[in-house]
Amino acid sequence: VLKSIIAPLKRESRVIGLILVLQDITRQFSLENMRKEFVANVSHELRTPLTTIKSYAETLLDGAMDEPSIARQFMSVVYNEAERMTRLVNDLLELSRLDNKETRWDKKPISPSGILKDVISKMLVNIKKKNLALETDILQHSPDIFADRDKIEQVFQNILSNAIKYTPEGGKIFIRLDSIEDRVRIIFGDTGIGIPKEDLPRLFERFYRVDKTRSRELGGTGLGLSIAKEIVEAHDGIITIDSELGHGTQVTILLPAVADSKVSNM
Ligand code: ADP
């Protein structure tokens, strides 16, 4: 994108030529567009649950309250939509803290397999509920990583919950932790719905979802992967996604191992 300014070149108040200044504003232009798109997305994402809350509350006030079973059902819709808004606002606040470098990191040498095992045991109910098979291959004596435990736990939980969300009943999830050279590698694989090739490069963008309706129905905010990427990068790590539509997805996280770290027993 070019911005042009044309000014007359004068000598003794006579125009003797024109000066053309061309400025490349591609970066400002795309940043500005991204900002506008982000604000539009936030407004839309907040308005959807608000509209539902308003209409259900209105129907309750108009008399549905007198029917206890209906009132209960309606109130649970109101509650769930309020929950969705809370999740969204929390994710937005977290992203804004990450953007403004206001996040307080509490980094120390820590065992990644310990964090991973905790996350798996927390999510086991959800895995069982969906009748998914779980295969794990976790290196017992992995090197430590220098990390903020809660933040890395949040990343693992997010990626694993996506694998669970986007894998139909009866599918399989596999989790692997190993160490290559001076890095720890964590892989979350699933045999789920997969992601079309053309969507892969945009997945880490805020609010980008392959299927908005499906993501919303499953309670997603569309911010999980962008938060995960910010956190991983704040640990000098890399996160990548590979996927094949209809076959499954694989998320790989590489984190630097603490140099000369004593191998911890987890
Ligand atoms: P959401 O809250 O929608 O899950 P995320 O940022 O976590 O948002 O993920 C962005 C999108 O990436 C999802 O909406 C979904 O389309 C796709 N996605 C993420 N993980 C998976 C997966 N394991 N399998 C299939 N699609 C996935």
Image (cartoon, helix red, strand yellow):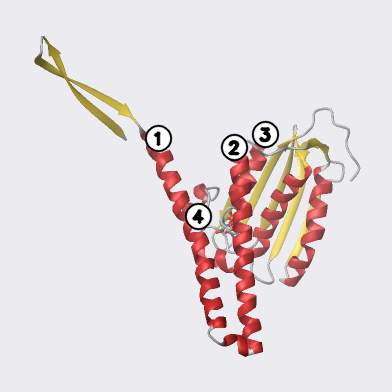
As measured in the structure, the alpha-carbon distance from the residue carrying label 3 to the one carrying label 2 is 18 Å
> Helix, strand, or loop for circle 2?
loop
> Helix, strand, or loop for circle 1?
helix
Give the residue pinned by disc 1.
28
Numbered tag placed on residue 235 in the rendering: none
Q: Nearer the viewer, residue 126 or 222?
A: 222
Q: Earlier in the sequence, mark 4 or mark 1?
A: 1
Residue farthest toward the right in the current orientation of the protein: 265
Q: Nearer the viewer, mark 3 or mark 2?
A: 2
Residue farthest toward the top in the current orientation of the protein: 12
Q: Earlier in the sequence, mark 3 or mark 2?
A: 2
Q: Earlier in the sequence, mark 4 or mark 2?
A: 4
Q: Nearer the viewer, residue 148 or 91?
A: 91
As measured in the structure, the alpha-carbon distance from the residue carrying label 4 to the one carrying label 3 is 29 Å
Q: Nearer the viewer, residue 6 or 234?
A: 6
As measured in the structure, the alpha-carbon distance from the residue carrying label 2 to the one carrying label 1 is 19 Å
Q: Residues within 10 Å of mark 1 (few under 14, many from 20)?
A: few
Q: Nearer the viewer, mark 2 or mark 1?
A: 2
Q: Which residue: 56% across, 63% down?
A: 215
- Which amino acid, by three-letter code, is at mark 4? Val
Query: Where's residue 7, x and y in %?
Result: 19, 22
Numbered tag placed on residue 236 in the rendering: 3
Q: Nearer the viewer, mark 4 or mark 3?
A: 4
Q: Quadrant of residue 194?
A: bottom right
